[in-house]
Amino acid sequence: MHASKSTPVGPSRVKLGLIGDNIARSQSPRLHRLAGRMCGLDVSYASLIPADLGMNFDQVFERCRTDGFRGVNITYPYKETVIDKVRIDDPTVRALGACNTILFEQDGPRGFNTDSSGFASAFVSAFGSVAPGRVTMAGAGGVGKAIAFALGKLGATHLALVDPDQSKSAALAASLAAYFPNLDISRPETLAEAVDGADGLINSTPIGMVGHDGNVFDGLDLKHSRWAFDAVYTPVETQFLAAARTAGAEILSGYELFFHQGAHAFRLFTGQEPDEGALRTAMLAPEQCDAGRAYVA
């Protein structure tokens, strides 16, 4: 009797996706596929634009839930929309009110925010144990919320929120005050009022990305700030970061937020730990690169 030959076992398959508008140039599919390859996983990662699919967000989300997806990332403008569809175990994520990473579990979808944890990791990687200090942030949308809560956890002492939509900054200020009672929060009407005395400056608006040229801090005196972060990562060197660097500030680019939040999401999706150094190198390899976008929502 001849011994039977076993069928070779291939890499485990993991089906993922990104739901959002204007995501055709996102780098997330490449990051997750490369990370999967490094961990011996066969990762598929679909770009799911509701309008292009002739569906609304609810319909796309439900299709993912029933069609074998392990999970999805959520980006603009759906990070707050998805809140009512998921169970959120982390009280910080419940308080900030936005999710960018969803796992489809047997007992229902679970929501996470790797924008917040990713920013915290990027900040510590760049600046070590130095606290954020007094921070001024332009923009109080989805990614601004995540960054604000990360700043609270990192020990920021004061956060000035500036957004043309006063209702957004007011809602975020209220959420932060309830969760971080020791964080001093202000809502000046203009950035000019908030820059003086700030240790850190943050742009969490689309201003500065390709197609939205400009610098939200243009014309302001930045020389007293010791660090600056821009959520935009296309281009990586924005006009704002160039001006802040010239003024003597240490720089944290939006690409770092993109990379760290993506690595955190991959760990949630798969339980695997990619070699972040190797993943970073692979992401930056010329043959792998294509244009990205602003990491804002």
Image (cartoon, grey):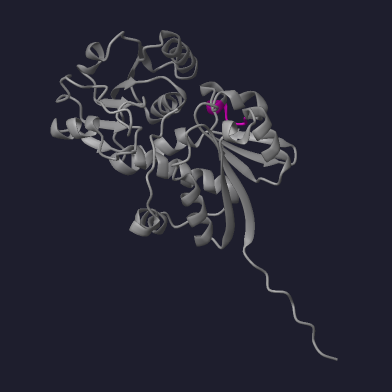
**Magenta stretch encompasses residue 178:** no
Position of 177 compared to 155: left or right? Answer: right
Place residue 84 in its image quadrant.
Answer: top right
The total of numbered circles placed on residues is 0
Residue in view at x 66 percent, y 28 percent: 58
Residue in view at x 60 percent, y 46 percent: 16
Residue furthest toward the right? 1
Viewer-nearest residue: 125 or 254? 254
Place residue 165 in its image quadrant.
Answer: top left
Q: Residue 82: x and y, percent?
A: 61, 27
On-image quarter of the N terminus: bottom right
Q: Residue 163: x and y, percent?
A: 37, 14
Q: Residue 240: x and y, percent?
A: 23, 29
Position of 64 compared to 203: left or right? Answer: right
Instruction: Evaluate whether residue 141 shows in this view.
Output: yes
Q: Residue 24: x and y, percent?
A: 47, 40
On-image quarter of the C terminus: top left
User: What is the magenta range?
Assistant: 88-93
Viewer-nearest residue: 18 or 152? 18
Instruction: Evaluate whether residue 273 shows in this view.
Output: no
- Asked if 44 appears above or below 177 in the picture, the reply is below
Viewer-nearest residue: 220 or 146? 220
Residue in view at x 37 percent, y 52 percent: 289
Viewer-nearest residue: 116 or 48? 48
**Magenta stretch encompasses residue 92:** yes
Position of 176 compared to 211: left or right? Answer: right
Residue furthest toward the bottom? 1
